[in-house]
Image (cartoon, rainbow, N blue to C red):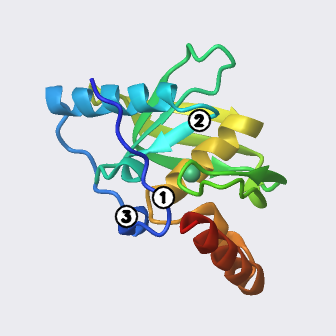
Amino acid sequence: MAILPILSLPHPSLRRPADHVTTFDDQLKKVVADMFETHYATPNCGALAANQLGIPWHITVIDPSENKDEPLCLINAEIIEKSEETVNVKEGCMSVPGGFYYAVERHKTIKFRYQDVDGHTHEQEADDYLSRCVQHELDHLRGVVFTDYLPPFRRKLFMQKYMRKQHR
Ligand code: ZN
C-alpha cells in the first residue's frame, strides 16, 4: 500500500471528469487500498475523490465515522434522489489547503447508487454530513471544486488569496 500525494488547486487533474470503472480486478482493489491509506493518514480528512490523487477513475473513499472504522468506497456512484430541502454549511477541501472554508448549498438528504470493489450494486440513503460529503465528492469526480459555487466576485478574491498563500 502507499500514501499518495493529494493534489491541490489549480492542478488540472481536479478539472478532469472521471472515467467510469468497468474492470473490477486486483488493480482496482490496490488503488482503493491506497486511497484509504492516504485518507486515514491525512488529518481531518472526511473523504477523497480519485482525481484528487491523480487517479482517473470514478472512485471515492469516505469514512464518516468518528472512530474512522467505517470505510465506504463508492465506485461509479450517482445520486438518484434528492430532497427539495437544502442546507448551507461551511465546507473545506483537502485540495484547497490554507484554511479556506465556505458555505455551499447542498441537498439535505440524498439517495445514491454505487458499486463496491467487487462490482456489486448498492443503494443507500444519506442525511446531513454524509449527504453533503457524497455531493462534494461527486462534484470532484465531474471536475467541480466547492469554491466554484462562490459568486464570481468572491471567487476571484478567493483565488487571489489562495494563489498568494501557495507561493509563500
Ligand atoms: Zn474536496
Mark 3 and mark 2: Cα distance apart in space: 22 Å
The residue depicted at 61 percent of the width and 35 percent of the height is: 46
Query: In the rendering, at what x and y percent does residue 9 appear?
Result: 50, 65
Please state which of the two labelled residues, at mark 3 or mark 1, is closer to the viewer. Answer: 1
Q: Amino acid at mark 2?
A: Cys
Above-or-below relation of 26 to 126: above
On the image, which quarter does residue 35 sit in?
Answer: top left
Q: Which disc number belongs to residue 17?
A: 3
Name the residue located 73 percent from the left edge and 37 percent from the top edge: 129
Q: Amino acid at mark 3?
A: Pro
Residue at label 2?
45
Is residue 145 found left or right of 29 in the rendered image? right
Label 3 crowd bin: few (<14), some (14–19), many (20+), radius 10 Å: some
Q: Quadrant of residue 163?
A: bottom right
> In the rendered image, which quarter contains the C terminus?
bottom right
Looking at the image, which residue sits at the far bottom?
Answer: 153
* Disc number for residue 16: none
Q: Are marks 3 and 1 in contact (CB under 8 Å)?
A: no
Q: Nearer the viewer, residue 131 or 156?
A: 156
Q: Which residue is mark 1?
A: 8
Mark 2 or mark 3, which is nearer the start of the sequence?
A: 3
